[in-house]
Amino acid sequence: MSSGLGSFSYIERDYQDILSAVVERIPQITPEWTDWNQSDIGIAILQLFAGMAEMLAYTEDQHANQLTIPTCTQRESMINLTASLAYTMANVTASSVDLLFSRIAYTTVTATTTLNAAVGVQTRTIKVPSTSYPYASNDVLYLNNGVNSEYVIIDYVVTSGVESTITIKGVTRYAYSIGDSVGIINKQKNVIIPDNLKCSTSGANPIYFETNVTEENYIIYAGSQYVNETYILDYDTTYNTITLSNAFDFVINDTLYLKSSLFTNTAALTISNISDRVITISESLPNWIQAGDLIARLVPASQGITRTEVLSPSTGLPSQERELTHTPLIDTSIEVSINEGSAYEIWTRVNSFYSSDSNDKHYTLEIQANDKGLITFGDGVNGKIPTLNAEIHATYVQGGGVNGNVGQNTINKVAASVTDEGGNVVSLSVNNPSSSSGGSDKESLDIARVRAPALYAAVYRALSLSDFEALSIGYRDTTYGTVANAIAVESGIDNAVSVYVWAADNNGFATTTSSGLKNSLKTYLESRAAAGYLVSVLDGYTTAVDITATVYVRSGYTQSTVRSAVTSTINSLFRVENLSPGENFSLGNLYEAIENTEGVDKVDIILPARPGVSISTRHIAIRGDILLTMVGGSQ
């Protein structure tokens, strides 16, 4: 039986449409109700219900949006949706860097007395601060005047107040003056650089790094200043070889620090081959290199802090879960050890318990939407249940992200005490001759929205240009970082593909990728490509877009606040994951973005000119110079 009220449009979901649709039906339901003024109590009640209906409709829409990948806005929903496509959203990665450690091994001469003034080169007494070292007879000293150096033996020492007068056996070969260096050699001990030694940048919010030296020896030997310090005996610029004075346990791919004998030039060198004391360098030797230059070993480090958590003991129940505390965490660093009665034993991480037997000491790790790690143990059928009251420890590295990609010469603090082999605390300095790289933020929803369906459609194989792009965008190497964007083009010959790639800098703008990341991606693509494909991975290009505009500020807003908001809006337009290679930069989109910024009344854009900036196929737009003139509002 028809109600006679007509159909109700279910696309009318906002307040005004719902209210209008209900009011239009009043005559059909209650003809005697004729007062539809705003002051009418009935109209007020309808307005209340229309508002409630609008809120319910909005909530329904939001829930519905979380059910599909294209409309999803919540990270937890995206994690679950992409997991149904056998896709795991990438976690943060930590940046890596090579550190230069040096030992403050010498004090300085405070005064000298020169004997045999006619010759002018010999001295027998040296005065030093008495607090420097416990000098004694027969100690061996190292003297260095910046040009020449030698070893001498102490005859006797006389201390008066804060100064010690050292008399040596015989005389020196060279002249010395105030400020020259003197070190006590035989009382120095070797300093072994430990694993997980914390270093950091300076400032209120330091970025921490830890050394990674578990398999190699990194030693500052007694009398040396740097790690594995040695000198160049000979070199050959034709073959890029260097002959060292000592055969330390250098390994291929070690990064070495080269310092000129006059300390005016430096360079970082990579070892490609080793034959006793002769090393071959990957790069061309610098033109200033000469015999006598110093070589030191750089120490590998990665961003983050090692954390060890004592988790709650086992309950003996199946499928136990333990949530970790610190975020973000490097998921590849996790180590879970359990003591079931006799000793701690490291359990094995697996992606799932599908292939686990009832006695397999396995666990899984899930990075949740809140960035915390969730450890899960087996149920006794697939994966072992930790015995009742078993003690559970988890060790992992907290860190990662693009904020760990710091510039050169910024890591300059040793944040922990270091002792020599004699147990004495020593003073070390640290520096990073090159910038750190490889740090990546967790995968964004926009990347996952594109990458997960594309990889599923490609079945993780590369047969078309779109397949190569899908496999490249978001590709992540735990050492070298993430590919933020990519485009694949035909190379002009059969079965040859060139993939142009970009990384993201600390601002999220497009930048070049490291050679390590390009090589890693190339190997990955070749393993996925059909037989016979020739794959090359190249750096993509960038086109800078300069912006000059006059921004008119609304009343009630300050110019500084609106300037900051407009700058952030402009920056968001240039985030590399939001752009497509070859996509022209639209002036209209720029107008729309700025004018929709809170506090902006209107904007006049001088640069770029209409219609925008043309971007070539292998290019991506990056933000250039911004010049904003603020008008109106308050200062």
Image: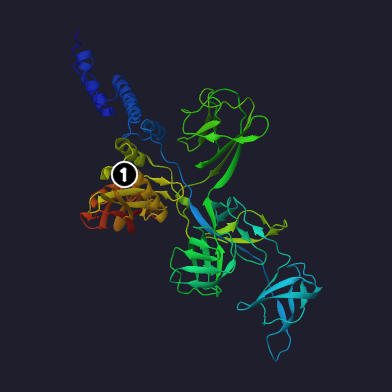
* Kind of element beneath mark 1: loop
Tell me where residue 243 appears, x and y as whole percent: 53, 69
The vertical placement of 510 against 433, above or below, is above
The vertical placement of 634 against 362, above or below, is below
Residue 218 occupies quadrant: bottom right
Q: Residue furthest top?
A: 1
Tell me where residue 237 appears, x and y as whole percent: 45, 72
Q: Which amino acid does label 1 sit on?
A: Ala
Q: Number of labelled discs? A: 1
Residue at left offset 20%, top offset 11%: 3
The vertical placement of 497 against 176, above or below, is above
Tell me where residue 220 appears, x and y as whole percent: 63, 61
Residue 78 shown left or right of residue 271 in the figure: left
Q: Which of 182 and 72 is in front in this view?
A: 182
Whether residue 30 appears in this view of the structure is: no
Residue at left offset 19%, top offset 10%: 2
Figure colour scheme: rainbow
Residue 507 shown left or right of residue 135 in the figure: left
Residue 145 shown left or right of residue 444 in the figure: right
Q: Which of 338 and 291 is in front in this view?
A: 291
Report the residue marked by disc 1: 529
Tell me where residue 317 appears, x and y as whole percent: 57, 22
Residue 579 shown left or right of residue 351 in the figure: left
Q: Residue furthest bottom?
A: 118
Q: Nearer the viewer, residue 229 or 437?
A: 229
